[in-house]
Amino acid sequence: MYAPPAQAQRSLQLGVGILSAAAAVALLYYGRVFFITVTIAAIIAFLLEPMVGVFMKLRFPRGLASFLVCSMALMFLYFAALGLYTEGVAMLDDVPAYGARINELVDTAAGRIETFQQGVYRTLIPRRFQDGATNLPVPAPDPAAASRNKKKKPDTAAPDTPPIQEVRVHTDPTPLVNYLYDYLRSFYGVLLMASFVPFLVYFILSWRDHLRSRLLSMFEGESRYTLAKALDGVADMVRAYVIGNFLLGLLLTAISALLFASVRLPYWLVVAPMSGFLSLVPYIGLPLALAPPLIAALPMTAVPAVYLFLSAGVALLHLLGLNLLYPKFVGSRVHLNPLVVTIALMFWGMIWGGIGLLLAIPLTAALKAVCDNVSSLQAYGRLLGD
């Protein structure tokens, strides 16, 4: 059959688009460590750019301003890690108490399960079958057999066997050793890529104007203006999303700290930030936020009221944060509909794992910002929006 030129052109464009999308997904999957590193560095650079602007208003060159801002960020991370390390060393002293409490809970749970099984057995099995296994007649001992055993001569001694000589045999590494080696090797690759993040952030900040001008010089007329608007839209969207989440996490941390301090929870200064920021993880934030306070409360007391109070408080705070505070801090800046958010979490979680769940919304918001600022893609931006 003869196809018109326009229809053939559209079919060709559709086929090329499908192949390009498949190639992009494969590239993102197999090069995920590289792309995750670059994405995280770009997001951090977007966050630190306003501070660089403040130093530049004070007559600092961009290179020096970028170096000072990166140094301040590294110092902040160092003191945060030092505080976590100090609290972690203190928690090591309480490990026996945690172990004893966990053993007590396991023994209690095992006893209750056994009692439940016995109750079910007594309920479902008739009484006569229960007693039949314990009332069987026991045969009387045979005195003749006992006397024959006494008269039986002992066996002759076995001949002496020569001593066994030790033979050293070279054995291959066990599967556990191979597994640990493969795991550490993959972890080494992640650490190697993570070590490039500070350098990437510094070069993105210090060379921002140069990279932007060279990129815009590749286009002319309306395309250059559209690209400039798209870049500014992506930076503003990502910065607003991350800053909104950070401010909301700080607010949840402060409220959680007051809640945990009221019951004198051990190590509440560490548990409160963990619970507050883990509560912001999409869909699985509630169980993640519950885990730190419940684990920290194990050696406190055996009274269930403490665990119920902590669970109810964290759950109420999580629901309050997502339904009332999240739309004001984050939702008004992103404008993504719930269906798109769910699909984005599924997609990025599938190709990038756990870190993909954290980067799914800013990446999708950046894509929407590009679509909103490009006239030919504005229909897709409205499809992604709320």
Image (cartoon, rainbow, N blue to C red):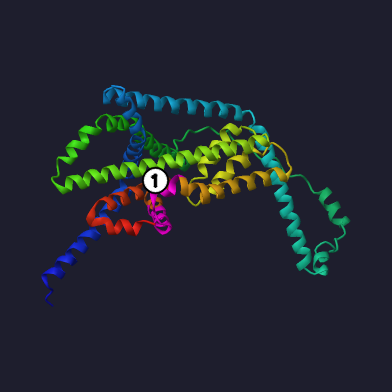
Image-quadrant location for residue 114: bottom right
Against 158, residue 53 (above or below) is above
**Left of 108 or right of it: where is 93?**
left
Q: Is residue 225 magenta?
A: no
Could you tell me how many numbered marks the image carries? 1
Looking at the picture, tell me which residue is in the foreground, 311 or 141.
Answer: 311
Q: Which quarter of the image is occupied by the C terminus?
A: bottom left
Q: Secondary structure at mark 1?
A: helix
**Label 1 belongs to which residue?**
359
Against 375, residue 259 (above or below) is above
Percent position of residue 154, x then y: 76, 44
Looking at the picture, tell me which residue is in the foreground, 350 or 160.
Answer: 350
Residue drawn at point x = 39 percent, y = 25 percent: 72
Packing grade of label 1 (10 A; few <14, some 14-19, many >=20) is: some
**Left of 73 or right of it: where is 290?**
right
Percent position of residue 331, x then y: 43, 49
Residue drawn at point x = 35 percent, y = 27 percent: 70
Please, which residue is most extreme toward the bottom here? Answer: 1
Give the extent of the magenta segment: 329-347
Percent position of residue 258, x then y: 62, 36
Q: Is residue 214 visible?
A: yes
Image-quadrant location for residue 344: bottom left
Percent position of residue 215, x then y: 19, 40
Q: Which quarter of the image is occupied by the N terminus?
A: bottom left
Secondary structure mostly seen in magenta is helix
Q: Please state which amino acid type lies under the numbered disc 1.
A: Leu
Q: Is residue 341 magenta?
A: yes
Looking at the picture, tell me which residue is in the foreground, 363 or 121.
Answer: 363
Please, which residue is most extreme toward the front here? Answer: 57
Q: Is residue 160 visible?
A: no
